[in-house]
Amino acid sequence: MSAAAATPVYNAPLAAMRFVLGEVLDAPSSWAAQPQFADLDLDTACEVLAQAGRFATEVVAPINAAGDLQGCRWTPAAGANGFPEVKTPDGYPAAWQAFVDGGWPALPCAPEVGGQGLPQLLNGALFEMLVATNHAWTMYPGLLHGAYETIKAHAVPELAALYLPKVVSGEWLATMNLTEPQAGSDLGLVRTRCTPVGGVPAANGVAVTVSGNKIFISGGEQDMTANIVHLVLARLPNAPAGTKGLSLVLVPKFLPDGSRNTAYCDGIEKKMGIKGSSTCQMRFDEAQGWLLGEPGQGLAAMFLMMNSARLHVGMQGLGHLEAATQRAVAYAAERVQLRAPRRPDDAAAHRGPDLIAWHPAMRRILLGLQAQAAAGRVMAYWTGLLLDESEQHPDAGRRRACHDLVALLTPVCKGLLTDLGHRGADEALGVFGGYGFVHDYGIEQHVRDSRIAMIYEGTNEIQAIDLTMRKWLDDPRRVEALLAEFAAEVATQTAQAQAADDGSEAGAAAQRWAATLAEQAGLIRQALAALQQARASDAEAPLRVADDVLHGLGASLFAWAWARLDRAARAALARGESEAGAEPGFLAQQIELAAYGRDWLLPAGAWRWQRVIQGAPALPWVRV
């Protein structure tokens, strides 16, 4: 086995995080405008992330590979109570207790309910690192904040008092029980029933019994917490068909009197990846629970949980992309093979086979991975920053504007970043050659684990349809709001180009970025107009190119992100690396990666926009 197998597998990208938060997005200015975060400064935020990075690398990373091999174990009707049980991999419960003891579940929760009151942006960065080091373990807390938001917003006071503090602290974990064998993504087909106890009228907080079957329930049964809070979509008697007939029910594993509720795990899935996460088949047999929110408003209540989850899933893609990139770069910097046509200037005296990192084919792959991770972090963190402002900013107009942008950006973050997380891990595996295909090097687990993120919380195809139909065509003002952001960056880059010395590299770069973003904005406008025109005569036309809209917009947003990275890095360099708090070479690398993204990766988005603007031909029917 090569020495590269022993190379540290992941280093929390704290320098990149600080650079994006402080230099690229100026997050502290945003926090200062929000009373809840007014006392938060960049150093404090980065210290939180440093501690989170240590937890990820020192606590959950060491149990990742072993947990993948061991997986979860399901025992039918075990124990004195006769209920099925699930045992998670060795070390998982202890890691969870350490997570709770560190106060991490409470990070973004409101102080009045026991939380730390920190931004969701920092919580997203925390989960980026957790997924990078152990995706399967991170599935257990992955829905916790969404459950907190849902209970906080919709539970009657008595129910909130019982369950909210335990969810905030992480003493109890939560699940989201949506889909069923016959439903898939079409939740209008859900059959699970809930019936008010004693025949009382259905209302928020009313006790009900729940009966039905759910599938693909992450953490539906586990041995990490003393209780599990199931949030279950179900139908009241005489509820209308479709999604309007769905209500949300809180169903605990153990009832307030300590008795075991009749919520059963009938089995766990044998999966391609995230094997340490118990993906359960759940059966509710007259299980006791309480309505959470108003009758018939279950899906609306659940969307608080789902929207938070979708941004976190985007962070999962970013985490895999970053971790896979680090593994590939570390291996390429140690593995020697063949002779490269050129060598770096500082390696002129090198003898023997060359590092594979010097070969053009490997440089193209590695630079592409690094540039995508850098742009993906800017896009994801900007979305998190806007999400916080949409909830916490004191100005109602600003909250609405941020909400509109978040609605537009969330499906792109979820769809594009999970796609890049999986495909990037697959590309990174190729850097290892045959070694990448074996478990010892860890990269094949990233390929397997990352694939599920493209499927759950709404498949990437559904994200593309949502973006194209609801976020573009049904409400074009959101696109205009995004174009205003592009226009602002074009104006800034143009001003910098005009202020620079004639012929300077900085001035030329600013001028080129201004032209690039202006071109991307023009493509977005043309695409919107083409979609509007096509839909008028062919209802299927926008759906045929929905995936192209998502990836085309993602490419344009990456161009915006690379422009911001370039501008911020040049400004920091002008102050001096030490004053900017950057390691030697880091800022120059950001400029190189931004240029690589623009020159090598952005052109790939052109054919996406071309197909949207020109219109895709009609699809033939699949012969079955």
Image (tube, helix red, strand yellow):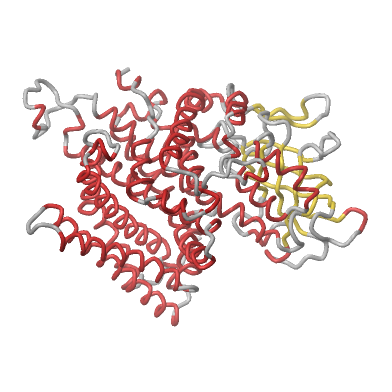
Instruction: Please state which of residues 510 and 555 is positioned toward the viewer in this rendering.
Output: 510
At horizontal 65% and vertical 36% (from top left) the residue drawn is 169
Q: How many marks?
A: 0
- Residue at x-position 85% and y-position 51%: 207
Does residue 572 appear left or right of residue 73 in this picture? left
- Residue 240 location, quadrant: bottom right
- On the image, the x and y values in percent for residue 530 come to 36, 76
Work out whether residue 413 or residue 27 is closer to the camera in this orientation and state it: 27
**Left or right, 244 with reference to 524:** right
Percent from the top left, x then y, of residue 537?
Answer: 44, 82
Residue farthest toward the bottom in the current orientation of the protein = 537
Residue 72 picture quarter: top right
Between 46 and 61, which is closer to the camera in this rendering? Answer: 46
Residue 622 seen in the figure: no
Give how far across and how far down residue 122 sits, in percent: 48, 43
The picture quadrant where one finds residue 580 is top left
Residue 319 seen from this side: yes
Q: Is residue 2 left or right of residue 57?
A: left
Instruction: State the quadrant of the N terminus.
Output: top left
Is 226 rendered above or below residue 540? above
Query: Against 132, is 621 above or below?
Result: below
Horizontal side of residue 180 vs 136, given as left or right: right
> In the rendering, at what x and y percent does residue 596 appear?
21, 48
In the image, farthest residue toward the right: 198
